[in-house]
């Protein structure tokens, strides 16, 4: 939580006894290199130890590699206790949102977050693992309920990890110690590339799957787990055989408050808006793109068509999309190295900017919608401010491409006074250097660095930064700012967590989940509350991340701020 493994790209979207456990052996994961003795089963942070709890992977016997390898993405799916209808009924679904946004979605506007961080909820029903390999082809016909087989060990609730490897989708029970998946679904004609889950879907179809061929499916995750037959049951098919767009699906997401709408990004720079409850077999026709270098939105020519709208974002691949938590804004990053942020209600570009080098591969919003993280081929993590419409910090610590970024919405500073006046954010990043980096960011202290005259030392003179002093007009794509004009962050920890390049990262209430591109997933439990309180009382209350800072009331008055300790290097 999107790019081809053959060119070493990765994105995402995107588990744990407190004792040390051994890493997967080569016999259980032949695609991976033997576990390095340098990889520890824990890493230290200022609040305590994160410990490796569970590992999840695919069964090597279930892989066919008929279409070559793909980059693994992970989706966390939480099935609620009450079972949903197995057949779409036309009832609206989605996250709570204002009525204004819902009506806007009906006009082909809206956004969704297909990679929401969800907490664990006890043990899943079905104490026994039922391993099922479902061979399916490009045609997905709903199965006859009178002939389908039912898994009696599944009670219709639980938390699951959905991930793709090669030509298969695997589903694992998050709270089981069993490494192997409880279900696998193989695609005979294409590879699954991306997926998203809607925990609030009311019509049963809560899981989206986008394929390398451009085809898109919606299915009920509950139905797949209940049925043990060798086919995917009750699937709805969109963009069949790439009839509307035959380029690779790179990112997919539900629309929050969108009444079952979802969006699909493609490798040709186009994004499509679909309505789940419309007939997916009714093909859409769109006018020719007038200027491939410019952003444009076109509606389908006929009201019954699906998809209902096409957004031409850029030339080259859209590598990742992400939506603000309220669904008001859509962020995209692409092969051209630009972050673009759109107001999905007005279908207008709000702002955006260029990477320092190469493509951007991943992006993620803070829960309050104020900040956006990006990572890519320049090995850096950038923090964008929606209020300032510009980069406000950049982080250096990875030794290769940054393939996944995410805010930790469950973390709070141990030294917070609860007033909300001083907000500190925790976020993480993973890269092809196999490392997980964690960062702390106190936004009240993000300010212009000290100016350094050519050939001289830092100065408080009248020299000012155009990056900070200029007001960025709406709809402007900016070049990368000079690094000396933007505060630099350093990670609080850097830990090698896998032997293979990483492709995904997500946070839950109890853990941090990391995934490598070969389909191996690790779940790291957070420090206990008592350990966190103990470390908080002993440690310096501040941790140093910013190189310099200045007062908010007078940007010309600059001062150095020392924020503590060194990076925890594992």
Image (cartoon, rainbow, N blue to C red):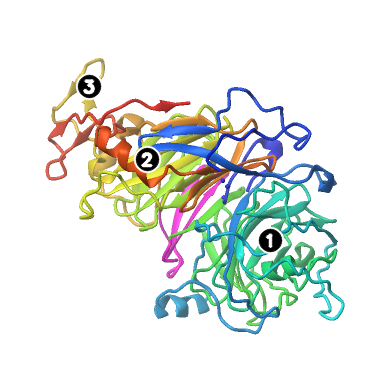
Pinpoint residue 75: horizontal percent, then vertical percent: 60, 55
Q: Residue 478's x, y, as percent? A: 39, 45
Q: Is residue 340 above or below residue 9?
A: below
Q: Which mark is residue 209?
A: 1
Instruction: Determine the image quadrant of residue 354.
Output: top left
Q: Which residue is mark 3?
A: 453
Residue 282 image position (x, y, % from top left):
73, 77
Where residue 394 sits in the image (x, y, percent)?
Answer: 38, 36
In front: mark 1 or mark 3?
Answer: 1
Residue toward you, 540 or 288 = 540
- Left/right placement of residue 191 relative to residue 206 reads right
Does label 1 or label 3 sit earlier along the sequence? 1
In the depicted view, which residue is nearer to us: 83 or 314?
83
Q: Which residue is mark 2?
A: 531
What's the distance in space between the residues labelled 2 and 3, CA to CA? 46 Å
Residue most extreme to the top = 455
């Amino acid at each position: 939580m999107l790019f081809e493994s053959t060119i070493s790209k990765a994105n995402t979207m995107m588990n744990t006894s407190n004792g040390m456990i051994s890493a997967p052996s080569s016999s259980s994961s032949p695609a991976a290199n033997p576990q390095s003795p340098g990889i520890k089963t824990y890493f230290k942070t200022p609040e305590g130890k994160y410990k490796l709890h569970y590992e999840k992977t695919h069964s090597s016997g279930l892989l066919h590699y008929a279409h070559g390898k793909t980059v693994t993405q992970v989706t966390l799916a939480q099935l609620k206790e009450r079972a949903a209808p197995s057949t779409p009924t036309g009832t609206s679904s989605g996250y709570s949102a204002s009525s204004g946004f819902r009506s806007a979605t009906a006009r082909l506007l809206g956004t969704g977050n297909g990679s929401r961080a969800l907490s664990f909820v006890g043990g899943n029903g079905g104490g026994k693992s039922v391993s099922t390999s479902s061979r399916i082809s490009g045609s997905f016909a709903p199965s006859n309920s009178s002939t389908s087989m039912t898994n009696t060990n599944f009670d219709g609730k639980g938390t699951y990890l959905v991930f793709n490897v090669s030509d298969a989708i695997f589903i694992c029970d998050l709270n089981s110690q069993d490494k192997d998946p409880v279900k696998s679904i193989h695609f005979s004609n294409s590879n699954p590339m991306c997926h998203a889950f809607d925990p609030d879907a009311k019509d049963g179809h809560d899981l989206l799957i986008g394929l390398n061929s451009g085809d898109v499916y919606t299915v009920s995750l509950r139905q797949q787990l209940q049925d043990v037959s060798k086919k995917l049951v009750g699937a709805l098919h969109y963009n069949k055989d790439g009839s509307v767009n035959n380029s690779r699906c790179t990112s997919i997401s539900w629309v929050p408050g969108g009444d079952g709408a979802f969006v699909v990004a493609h490798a040709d720079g186009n994004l499509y808006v679909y309505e789940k409850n419309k007939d997916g077999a009714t093909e859409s026709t769109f006018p020719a793109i007038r200027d491939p270098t410019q952003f444009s939105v076109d509606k389908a020519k006929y009201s019954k068509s699906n998809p209902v709208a096409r957004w031409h974002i850029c030339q080259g691949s859209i590598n990742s999309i992400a939506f603000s938590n309220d669904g008001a804004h859509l962020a995209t990053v692409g092969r051209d190295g630009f972050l673009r942020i759109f107001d999905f209600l007005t279908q207008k570009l709000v702002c955006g900017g260029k990477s320092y080098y190469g493509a951007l591969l991943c992006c993620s919003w803070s829960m309050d919608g104020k900040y956006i993280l990006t990572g890519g081929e320049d090995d850096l993590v950038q923090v964008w401010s929606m209020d300032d419409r510009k980069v406000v910090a950049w982080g250096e610590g990875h030794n290769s491409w940054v393939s996944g970024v995410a805010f930790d919405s469950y973390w709070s500073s141990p030294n917070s006074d609860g007033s909300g006046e001083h907000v500190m954010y925790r976020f993480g990043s993973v890269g092809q250097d196999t490392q997980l980096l964690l960062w702390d960011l106190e936004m009240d202290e993000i300010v212009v660095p000290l100016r350094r005259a050519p050939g001289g030392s830092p100065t408080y003179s009248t020299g000012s930064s155009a990056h900070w002093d200029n007001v960025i007009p709406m709809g402007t794509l900016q070049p990368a700012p000079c690094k000396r004009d933007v505060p630099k962050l350093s990670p609080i920890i850097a830990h090698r967590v896998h032997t293979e390049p990483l492709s995904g990262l997500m946070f839950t209430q109890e853990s941090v989940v990391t995934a490598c591109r070969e389909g191996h997933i690790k779940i790291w439990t957070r420090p206990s509350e008592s350990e966190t309180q103990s470390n908080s009382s002993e440690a310096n209350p501040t941790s140093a991340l910013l190189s310099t800072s200045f007062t908010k009331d007078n940007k010309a008055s600059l001062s150095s701020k020392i924020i503590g300790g060194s990076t925890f290097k594992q």
